Image (cartoon, grey):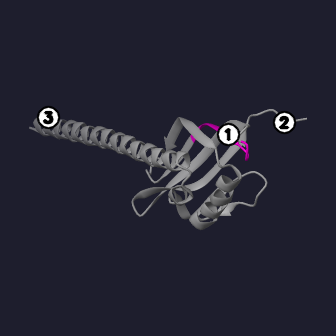
Amino acid sequence: MPTTRMFCAVAVLILACAVSYGQVKKATATAKQDLANEEKAIRDMDARWLKAAQMRDPSGEAAMFANDGVAYRGHVDPLVGPSAYQAFMVKFYAANPKVNSTWTTDAIRLAESGDLAVQTGEFRTTALGLKGDGEDKGRFVTVWKKVNGEWKVAHDIGSTTMPEVA
């Protein structure tokens, strides 16, 4: 009988491990699916931001930012919050009435917690200046964070890759 009890105990232990492994595997698959859904949500928000930029809509662009979100732009102090970003973009569009902006995403990396993400990519801006004859291109990094269930920009910075004008 002791051998039968030992066998039953080992069988129960193996069964418990198998069930536990199945639960972990299922939880991991669910977590990966959740992160994939979060990445899609970020891509959707980014598409809304790009559409607002292409429509030269400062209010629509500013809506992408968290209340404490920061944009780093050349030759100005950091822009903190949606209203600072919107004010900057109003001036930018007045100085660049023909501007066209576009960007593409190289990667979005989500934290396992699912509430923070880093997006990297490339931007191109054409028709800069009052005459619309300027251009810029470069790389960007955007940090997204979840705010009340919605993805918002926490930090955004771009860096030109255009050669310096002598």
Q: Nearer the viewer, mark 2 or mark 1?
A: 1
Q: Quadrant of residue 21?
A: top left
Tell me which segment is drawn in magenta.
120-131
Q: Classify mark 2: helix, strand or loop.
A: loop
Q: Amino acid at mark 1?
A: Ala
Q: CA distance from mark 1 to mark 3?
A: 84 Å
Q: CA distance from mark 2 to mark 1?
A: 18 Å
* Nearer to the camera, 129 or 146: 129
Q: Quadrant of residue 136?
A: top right
Asked if residue 133 lies left or right of residue 123, the reply is right
Residues at discs 1 and 3 in contact (Cβ within 8 Å): no
Quarter of the N terminus within the rendering: top left
Q: Amino acid at mark 3?
A: Thr
Q: Residue 96 location in percent, x, y? A: 68, 49
Q: Classify mark 3: helix, strand or loop.
A: helix
- Look at 70% across and 43% down and name the residue there: 128
Q: Which residue, given by chain and number where applicable, does mark 3 sit on?
A: 3
| In magenta stretch: residue 129 | yes
Q: Nearer the viewer, mark 2 or mark 3?
A: 2
Q: Which residue, given by chain and number where applicable, does mark 2 sit on?
A: 164
Q: Which residue, given by chain and number where applicable, does mark 1 sit on?
A: 127
Mark 2: few, some, or many residues within 10 Å (few <14, many ≥20)?
A: few
Residue 91, compared with residue 143, is above or below; it is below
Quarter of the C terminus within the rendering: top right
Q: Residue 22 location in percent, x, y? A: 25, 38
* Nearer to the camera, 7 or 34: 34
Mark 2 or 3, nearer chain start: 3
Mark 3: few, some, or many residues within 10 Å (few <14, many ≥20)?
A: few
Q: CA distance from mark 2 to mark 3?
A: 82 Å
Residue 152, compared with residue 35, is above or below; it is below
Mark 1 or 3, nearer chain start: 3
- Look at 43% across and 50% down and name the residue there: 114
